[in-house]
Image (spheres, grey):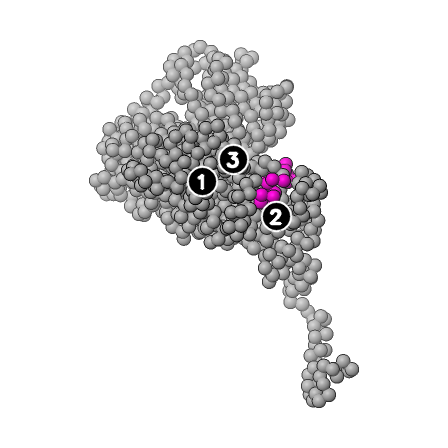
Amino acid sequence: MRYLGPLCGAKTAPRTLLILLLTLLLLGLGSLSPAVPGAQARTTAATARPWMNRSLSPDRRADLLLAQMTLDEKLALLHGWSGGSYVGYIPANTRLGIPALGLEDGPAGVADGMTGVTAFPAPEALAASWDTSLMRQYGQALGSEEWGKGANVALAPTVNILRNPQWGRSFETLGEDPYLTAMLASADIEGIQSQHVIATVKHYAANNQEYHRTTVSANVDERTLHEIYLTAFEYAVKEAGVGAVMCSYNKVNNVYACENPYLLATTLKGTFGFPGFVMSDWGATHSTVPAITAGLDMEMPDSTYFGNALKQAVLNGQVSMATIDEAVHRILRTMFAIGLFDYPTTGSPKATVTNAQHAQLARQAAEAGTVLLKNDGQLLPLDPSKIHSIAVIGPAASVAPQATGGGSAHVIPPYVVTPLQGITQRAGSGVTVRYAQGITTTGTLPPIEAQYLTPPSGSGQGLLGEYFTNMTLSGSPVLTRVDSQINFDWNGQSPGPGVPATQWSARWTGTLTPPVSGTYTFSLTSDDGSRLYINNQLLIDNWRDQATTTETATIQLTAGQPYAIRVEYYQNGGASNVALGWSIPGQENALLSQAVELARSSDVAIVFVNDVESEGSDRSSLELPGAQDQLIEAVAQANPRTIVVLNTGGPVLMPWVDQVPALLEAWYPGQEDGNAIAAVLFGDVNPSGKLPMTFPRSASDLPASTPAQYPGINDQADYSEGVFVGYRYYDERGITPLFPF
């Protein structure tokens, strides 16, 4: 008992000594008693891996883990890897218990070809709601579906300001106002990250056009940069605690955004105090040493610059270990902060994650974002007790509903309720609802039927397809076959035996024999490049890396005369599709006549029109594509009670606006399209949306209206309008818009 003397002192009472002895005995026997379930495992794990102690701060946990990592393990976190089922992937480190990172597109729902997900309305529809609470729910639902798919990094939200409404990604952003964008994006981020999924705010910075997006320089002064284009990023960092920032393809003041020290080190990580990590857009890394030292932490989607090249730069002293450690620390502390270590996803890319609650949220968001632009004579809401017949007109109403945008924000819906279906169901048995297409589809035209195509052999129907293992149609084809039509969507998979899933090309040849004489319209849609030749004349040149894009052209053809036809295509990563369509002369007149007669014989006519927006290309103009303007004018002349519903990704010109009494902007409304618009038309919900962007009267009214401003000259886009973007420009110049912000 010699150890008790110093502990207790000479005057300690015998009772106290007994209590102390019993206490020590119990403490000693504690290790022999049954353990609380899981407690011993947690204690062992915390001892072996102290960074798993949740009571420590994310920074401290990251420090502890970083101290155990080898150089190769550190570098493995700084770039994307092949494999995995997501658009971006970094494998797990099993030795240290670091979870894999699955990066997945998600501005409007889980994208990248995933099925079993909810197709929510485009973010701009949420912006039109001006409702941060609804936006937070939107983010929560998106985050939960990403997590359920096994992804733990959501590539959302997009917060680039709508500088020019021709921008092909206007549908996935939040409008033209920095403050509105900042508030809504912050709510979205909070919702996503509440599900233990890292949100990625993008695209940093001044990324405002798709035309030459990988080479153009946004030349913008410092005041404009901070007041207009960086505000939402600052709020995302300071207010929402966003975990990741994606730097953009373009240059800013002639320095690539992903190696721009002023943007990354000085502003984002310095002035804004961003503690998270910066990843590149896919293929937007252009160097090793300049990029890592400027503040880029992660190259996506591969290791071109941050793999072996970065390791060599470290070994030869060009990049310090402190720089590597900072980048790795930022990634790890973000993973700890958002909960990726403590709440690892158990989801699977093949899981079905959509549910009834998310479908209801999609409908609610589409309803809340619908904007009533015009309602002369109180034509709306429709009263089923007073009308007996409704004409529903337009491809977007039934055969080609514009529910989602394209590119990386495209979501595969589990279903789409068309406007015709929604209106028919809501109108009830007492109202006759009839449909007329009116015109051919506004984007991809109907595929050319095999009966009009003949392969070079002269026998059979279709075209001879030759498939190559390169992107240049070089050498001998590895696969040859007759394809009845050119109407393919391989979704990033191999088109046939011997052909790789990526970086391949194909050529189709034969003859085309038109059924009637006249002017034919051809459409060629592809991701990536495509070309159409008729009698060796290049008719459509769509030859470039891009998301799904449609180009059209017209040509005079004579009935019964064979014409040599050649279609060429190449694929360079990501999605893969190509479709050749046409419009036969006379079809348009017949369709239009049917629509006019239906409108004339109905109490009310509702015309649905749309544009087609996608990452990879800007709209060529603000006009509605195809013959939609003519369709509206013809229907309005036949029926003065005509309602127009716009399914557009941004402002469009409306030469017919004074001819129609009622007008609604419904954006890209997602899978509940028809149910949402029917609820608005019949007054079940209030069309309370407010425009998050200005609709101009003419293209000449746009703030960036000169070629030097947009799309730029020699890859130099001059932001000479300064802070006068959107409504600021109209106010400053005293210009009255068609419909104001």
Query: Tag 2, which secondary structure?
Result: helix
Mark whose residue sits in front, 2 or 1: 1
**Inter-mark Cα distance, 2 to 1:** 29 Å
> Which range of residues does the magenta coloring cover?
289-307
Picture disc at residue 254? 3
Asked whether 652 or 310 is in front, the reply is: 310
Question: Local crowd at mark 3 within 10 Å, few (<14), some, or many (≥20)?
Answer: some
Query: Tag 3, which secondary structure?
Result: loop
Q: Eyeballing the image, is 539 above or below 736?
A: above
Asked whether 352 or 9 is in front, the reply is: 9
> Which residue lies at the image location 50% right of the left edge and 53% below the top edge?
241
Residue 678 placement: quadrant = top left
Helix, strand or loop: magenta stretch: loop
Percent of width and height locating residue 534 = 47, 15
First in sequence: mark 2 vs mark 3: 3
First in sequence: mark 2 vs mark 1: 1
Percent of width and height locating residue 208 = 45, 37
Q: Eyeballing the image, is 589 above or below 110?
A: above
> Which residue lies at the image location 48% right of the left edge and 14% below the top edge?
537
Question: Local crowd at mark 1 within 10 Å, few (<14), some, or many (≥20)?
Answer: some
Q: Amino acid at mark 2?
A: Ala
Question: Left or right of 660: which side holds 567?
Answer: right
Picture disc at residue 327? 2
Percent of width and height locating residue 647 = 37, 36
Q: Mark 1 — residue?
A: 221
> Which residue lies at the image location 39% right of the left edge and 30% below the top edge?
706
> Which residue lies at the image location 63% right of the left edge and 40% below the top edge?
289
Question: Left or right of 195: which side holds 314?
Answer: right
